[in-house]
């Protein structure tokens, strides 16, 4: 327990903020979470629309690698809601073609053999060239990706000469699915880190979906567990500025003019919001804070479309290199509690959720035009089963600044959770931890920030 009930103000009620709230409340701190929206969850938030259907900020896949997230879900009793899918990656191409990278239940790296020899699309020569390019990764393991952060993945691939088809058909949608930016922009370090983890840890690339809404299986249970320990949650509460006296944070100024104070301040804001609330004196005082201005959020769009017939029977995540839908899923298959249309059971049709990226050019378009382009991309992948299919409903969620853009040379600007200011800590997917901006990253960053506060209090971790 915190010795004399020290207080912590948490700025932002996304997954990082809610995780930190639970961890700190568990340790006896007086916790208050300030969230600007009327719902919690940030980039993984979900809400019911006026017709009674769940809408999400975007499709969220649960990678096997996110052990810290599953520990948390076990603590709040919701791990049972992760529905693990068959361990494979399926790519759908225009014209109805498709290929699958499967795995075998064998020790690493043998588990990847079927992906190399039996994917049904790339030739053995192509896969051999690709495997050759990974020799430094196999030899140096996790020490290799950081040495390639100065290159984009496209530049790295060009150096390695592993072939255009692999880049276009496999890695382009993978880069877009991971961070919503193409191989010409994403740092080689990101793709190499992910590849190294998938190669070394057999279950890390296995993917799951929640059986329903993140609101019901992540955010609400986290809030309830923390509230039982006395944590307070204030939604519709925007933080405008951190008040800094040249040495410490002295309070936060809210949009309504109120000033709140605490012993510790923990930012769980997206990086662009953090930059906005930091006082100029801090941003100019220290390179640690000045560097944050280099991290920028990537635009992304999430589109749901309900169709009046079964188009894709896959109960798994799907990738597509063609069109504007690099990653998507038929929620009517993957997510049992989403089998609804206008709040009524929906069993005969498809309910797709598409991640639309790169979104820079598309985000300004009308909802109708975005849905038209997504629908066209989908129909190209399913020319037969989509014939005559009618759209019953569609929704579009635009996020102009989502995860931070991991372009080359950005690693050095990712802040540690502990800052040069004694009573100020930072969490969030963009801060330094293994998993980049992801659910696993948000939870890990919160764990590290909480450790920092415990250490500052001289409490055991
Ligand atoms: C479309 C999409 C798909 C994704 N898919 C996946 C996936 O498949 N797997 C995966 O692991 N990750 C995925 N992610 C990434 C994942 O959602 C994020 O990395 C994670 O949710 C980040 O959590 P966070 O708490 O760090 O930040 P956020 O979720 O951004 O939370 C920050 C919170 O701060 C609040 N806030 C902002 N400004 C203020 C202010 N001034 N005052 C008070 N509150 C404020 C915001 O409203 C928000 O609630 C996806 C993201 C998107 C957008």
Image: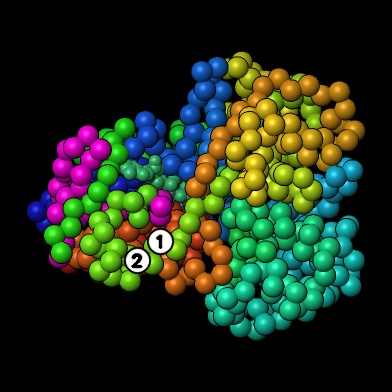
Which disc number belongs to residue 272? none
Residue at the spot 85% in from the left edge and 45% down from the top edge: 94
Q: Which residue is mark 2?
A: 290
| Image: 144 above or below 194 | below
Q: Residues within 10 Å of mark 1 (few under 14, many from 20)?
A: some
Other-residue count near label 2 (Cα within 10 Å), few / some / many at <14 / 14–19 / ≥20: some
State the image quarter where residue 446 is shown. Answer: bottom left
Residue 270: horizontal and vertical position, in percent? Answer: 41, 51
Note whether residue 25 is visible: no
Please tell me which residue is depicted at 28% across the width and 36% down the height of the picture.
237
Q: Which mark, residue 293?
A: 1
Dots 1, 2 in contact, CB < 8 A = yes
The segment highlighted magenta reads 247-272
Count numbered badges in the picture: 2
> Residue lying furthest left in this view?
4
Q: Is residue 84 left or right of residue 158?
A: left
Residue 263: x, y in percent? 15, 54
């Amino acid at each position: 327990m915190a010795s004399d009930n020290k207080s912590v103000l948490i700025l932002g009620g996304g997954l990082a903020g809610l995780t930190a709230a639970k961890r700190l409340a568990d340790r006896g701190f007086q916790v208050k979470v300030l969230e600007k929206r009327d719902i919690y969850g940030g980039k993984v938030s979900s809400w019911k629309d006026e017709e009674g259907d769940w809408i999400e900020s975007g499709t969220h896949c649960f990678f096997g690698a996110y052990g810290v997230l599953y520990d948390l879900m076990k603590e709040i009793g919701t791990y049972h809601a992760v529905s693990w899918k068959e361990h494979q990656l399926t790519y759908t191409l225009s014209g109805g073609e498709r290929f699958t990278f499967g795995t075998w239940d064998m020790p690493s790296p043998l588990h990847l053999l079927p992906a190399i020899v039996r994917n049904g699309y790339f030739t053995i020569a192509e896969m051999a060239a690709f495997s050759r390019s990974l020799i430094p990764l196999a030899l140096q393991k996790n020490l290799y990706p950081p040495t390639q952060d100065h290159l984009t993945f496209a530049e790295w691939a060009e150096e390695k000469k592993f072939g255009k088809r692999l880049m276009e058909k496999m890695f382009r949608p993978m880069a877009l699915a991971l961070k919503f930016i193409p191989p010409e922009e994403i740092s080689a370090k990101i793709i190499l880190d992910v590849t190294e983890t998938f190669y070394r840890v057999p279950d890390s690339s296995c993917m799951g979906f929640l059986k329903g809404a993140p609101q019901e299986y992540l955010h609400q249970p986290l809030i309830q567990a923390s509230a039982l320990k006395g944590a307070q949650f204030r939604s519709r509460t925007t933080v405008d500025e951190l008040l800094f006296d040249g040495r410490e944070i002295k309070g936060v100024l809210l949009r309504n003019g109120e000033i709140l104070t605490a012993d510790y301040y923990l930012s769980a804001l997206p990086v662009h919001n953090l930059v906005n609330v930091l006082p100029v004196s801090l941003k100019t005082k220290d390179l640690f804070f000045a560097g944050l201005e280099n991290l920028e959020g990537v635009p992304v769009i999430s589109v749901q479309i309900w169709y009046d017939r079964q188009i894709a029977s896959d109960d798994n995540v799907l990738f597509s290199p063609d069109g504007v839908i690099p990653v998507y899923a038929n929620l009517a298959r993957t997510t049992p509690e989403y089998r609804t249309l206008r709040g009524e059971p929906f069993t005969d049709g498809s309910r797709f959720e598409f991640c639309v990226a790169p979104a820079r050019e598309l985000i300004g378009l009308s909802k109708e035009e975005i849905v038209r382009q997504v629908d066209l991309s989908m129909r190209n992948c399913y020319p037969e089963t989509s014939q005559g299919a009618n759209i019953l409903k569609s929704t579009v969620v635009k996020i102009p600044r989502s995860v931070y853009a991991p372009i080359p040379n950005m690693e050095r600007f990712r802040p540690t959770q502990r800052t040069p200011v004694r009573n100020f800590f930072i969490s969030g997917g963009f801060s330094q931890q293994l998993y980049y901006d992801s659910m696993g990253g948000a939870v890990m960053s919160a764990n590290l920030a909480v450790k920092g506060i415990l250490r500052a209090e001289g409490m055991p971790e």
